[in-house]
Every structure is written in structure tokens, then in C-alpha cells.
Image: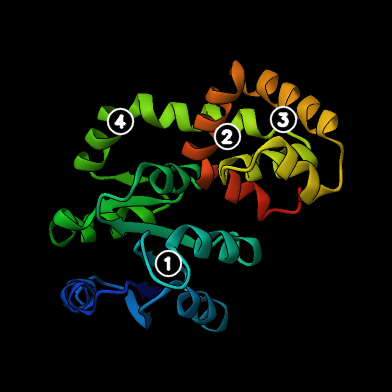
Amino acid sequence: MCNTNSILLVDDHPIVRSALIPIIDVIPNTQIIGQAEDGEDGYQKAISLSPQLIIADIEMPKMNGVDMVKKIKSIAPNTKVIFITSHSDLFTFEEALSLDVDGYIFKENAMKEIRSCIDAVLQNEKFTCEKFKQFIQINQKKIDRIRKNKLLVTQLTKTELEVLGLISKGKSSPQIADQLFKSIKTIENHRYNICKKLEVTGNNQLLTFAVKQRKILAEFMETDKI
């Protein structure tokens, strides 16, 4: 007798879940053991139910799919994951790609491809739908730029990240100095070092970088680096 593969379905749209359930239910040796409508609930159910496969949206309330999967993988690294999503913003999209999960499908193609994806993933294969591949190809340069910016930001020290975060909020050097209890000269030195590490020249370019890369800064400022 074959073992049954347990599946957790996490999506904030009940219509999507309702459409997927009958397709998944007829796949041999699979069973949906739980559903969740946001990332926080998905995380809690994943921990309590220990599914072998999680099918999740990327964009969800309370906790997005990327953060949910990161937390689950830190506890249950062998859990298989399929992302089924709409066209997310490129920053979140790149984060999802960086997780190297087992399957990627766009919702517009999900009803046709979910069974093939599940079959492949449960046989320890990777599955990426053609539309997803095309989207990556079209946006590859932008995705590469996001990755490069992340790499550049990793070179910054804790204090430099704090300074850059305040720059992104439009704070001047005197204001930053006052907030961080440092001299203006020290803040200017930090600005110089930040510009050098980020490969930008001048305060205007630094401000532009800081504002455009707020999501990257937020990601790093939430880690243990700060």
C-alpha cells in the first residue's frame, strides 16, 4: 500500500482554494489535511500538522508566503513547497525565487498545471510552469539588479544600515547625527563609506538608492545583523 502524501493549502482567496481542492482530491495517494487563509495561520498549521507538501500563495495578509516558508523551512527543512501566485512585485518575486522551492505556478494556469506540478514535486523533481519561465526571462535584468543591490547592502555595517535607513526617510546629516547621538562629521564619514560600498556617487544618488531600496533595507534591518 502506498503512503499518502499530506498537503496543506494556504491561500487568502477562498475561490482559489475551492477550485484547487477537487483537482487535488483525485490525485492518487494525496490528501489535503488542512487549509489556511493567511501566512500566520499557514505557519501554525504547518507546525501542528507537519504536511509533506505545502501549496501556498506568495502575496497574503499578516505574513506573506515567502516569510511563511522561511519560518517553516527553519523548523522542517524537508517540507516540499509549491508557490501558486499572481504576478507579484519583482522584489517579492525575487525573494520567492531565492528560496529555491519545488514548484512555481501562476494562478492563471493553476487549474491546468497543478496536477502535473504536484506529481513532479512528489517524485522529487522541480516544476516551473512555462508562463513563469517567460516572466523570469522578460524581467531577468531587473531581478539581477535586485540581487546585486542586496549583495551590496550586505557589505554595510549595523551603523551604516541605520544611517541609510534614516536617509531613506529624508533625514539630513544633522538630523541623523542628533538621532544617533553622533557628530555630523561622523555621519558624513558614514555617508562616504556607504556611497563607496554601494557604488554610488554623491548624496542625490545615495538618497535615490535609499528610497528605491527601502524593501531591501527593511529586510536586512529585520535580521540579526541589526
Q: Say which residue label 4 marks.
A: 139
- What amino acid type should be assigned to the residue bearing mark 4? Asn
- Nearest to the eye among marks 1 and 3: give it: 3
Colouring scheme, one of rainbow, by chain, secondary structure, one colour? rainbow
Mark number displayed over residue 155: 3
Comparing 110 with 149, the one in front is 149
Mark number displayed over residue 150: 2
Residue 18 in sight: yes
For label 3, the SS is loop
For label 2, the SS is helix
Mark number displayed over residue 53: 1
Comparing 90 with 54, the one in front is 90
Name the residue located 66 percent from the left edge and 38 percent from the top edge.
172
Q: Position of residue 114 (x, y in %)?
A: 22, 60
Q: Position of residue 223 (x, y in %)?
A: 69, 53
Q: Position of residue 179 (x, y in %)?
A: 77, 51
Q: How far separated are the C-alphas under marks 2 and 1? A: 29 Å
Comparing 37 with 104, the one in front is 37
For label 4, the SS is loop
- What amino acid type should be assigned to the residue bearing mark 2? Lys
Dot placed on the residue nearer the N-terminal end, 2 or 1: 1
Q: How far separated are the C-alphas under marks 2 and 3? A: 9 Å
Q: How far separated are the C-alphas under marks 1 and 3? A: 36 Å
